[in-house]
Amino acid sequence: MGVISIAFFNNKGGVGKTSLVYHLAWMYARLGVNVLAADLDPQANLTSMFLDDEQLEPLWPENGERPTVYGALRPLLEGTGDVTAPHVEQPEPGLGLVVGDLLLAAAEDEFSSEWPRCLDRRPRAFRVLSALARILRQGADEVGARLILVDVGPNLGAFNRAALVTADSVVVPLAPDLYSLQGLRNLGPTLRRWQSEWAERRERNPVEDLRVPTGAMRAIGYIVMQHAVRLDRPVKAYGRWIRRIPAVYATAVAGETAPLDGTAIERDPNCLATLKHYRSLMPLAQEARKPMFALKSADGAIGGHATAVQDCYRDFQALAETVAKRAGIEISPP
């Protein structure tokens, strides 16, 4: 079985996307699935979750080579060569990170201008549009990864289109609010258009030995980040919006007929999970530079925190297994 790539994407920010990628990457490593986490968000928040400032500073020099995803892309953007193999940080065996870079934002125009040129069978256009996929495949080879988890920024621009082209599957993290619902209505048609446009383009690739991604971008479900339970107006709003998610996702993203029975989110086959925020654990996890479900008493996870850590582990293990099943990844029992 080849390497499978899953992108986590929502064109609305602040929905917990980066935290999901971070925790799932650690969980898959614990479940025995070698995994590569790829930071393709120009904000580089995933990278900052894995690495502290002392580790990051030499990777982001003011001048010279940058061992980041931008550094691997740079020769192609500057016309001096093709992409290079990315530097991969390895927080632990079986877990790799392709380091993000704020300079990725500068690549937007290049990915935008080369997209239409694929229709004219321009070799450079295909090298550019397949660049991110080829970089990630090389990174996966370095750590023997069977799975690539891709963190994508919250917009529908040309760079994100190229980032989504790398993905076999797409998971949509969202929050139960008006903004996420509106985001779904924009995201679904956009994904389908990108799928169709890339399928048309990849058939015109004139470079025989250039491996271009399939760009399947198959939406396999959504994850809802729950708000803290409080008996006040925000919780009433939470209930209002969460009841509308199944129908909006079905019609806008999955391309299905909206459920007639007003399917509750707990019974919606498109819902991969509803996750708590675990707000009390996040500061401890950030301080310890580890996932919330790996916190120990020495990290301050005592009393109620210790119970929350156990709950968090069960939640993310169940989510990892569900996502793997939908994406076609086999997890061997421990």
Image (cartoon, grey):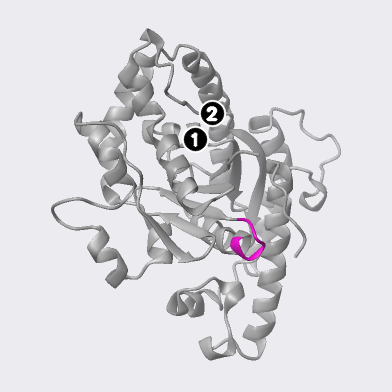
* Residue farthest toward the top in the current orientation of the protein: 120
- Contact? badges 1 and 2 (CB < 8 Å): yes
Q: From the image, which quarter does the N terminus lie in?
A: top right
- Residue 87 point in image, percent of width and height: 35, 52
Magenta extent: 29-33
Q: Which residue is mark 1?
A: 166
Q: Quadrant of residue 163?
A: top left
**Residue appearing at x 36%, y 8% in the figure:** 120
Relative vertical location of residue 249 with respect to residue 123 in this rendering, above or below:
below
Which of pointers 1 and 2 lies earlier in the amino acid sequence? 1
Q: Which residue is mark 2?
A: 215
What is the tally of numbered marks visible in this picture?
Answer: 2
Q: Amino acid at mark 2?
A: Gly
The local crowd at label 1, few if under 14, some if 14 to 19, many if 20 or more residues have their Cα within 10 Å, is many
- Is-magenta flag for residue 116? no
* Residue farthest toward the right in the current orientation of the protein: 261
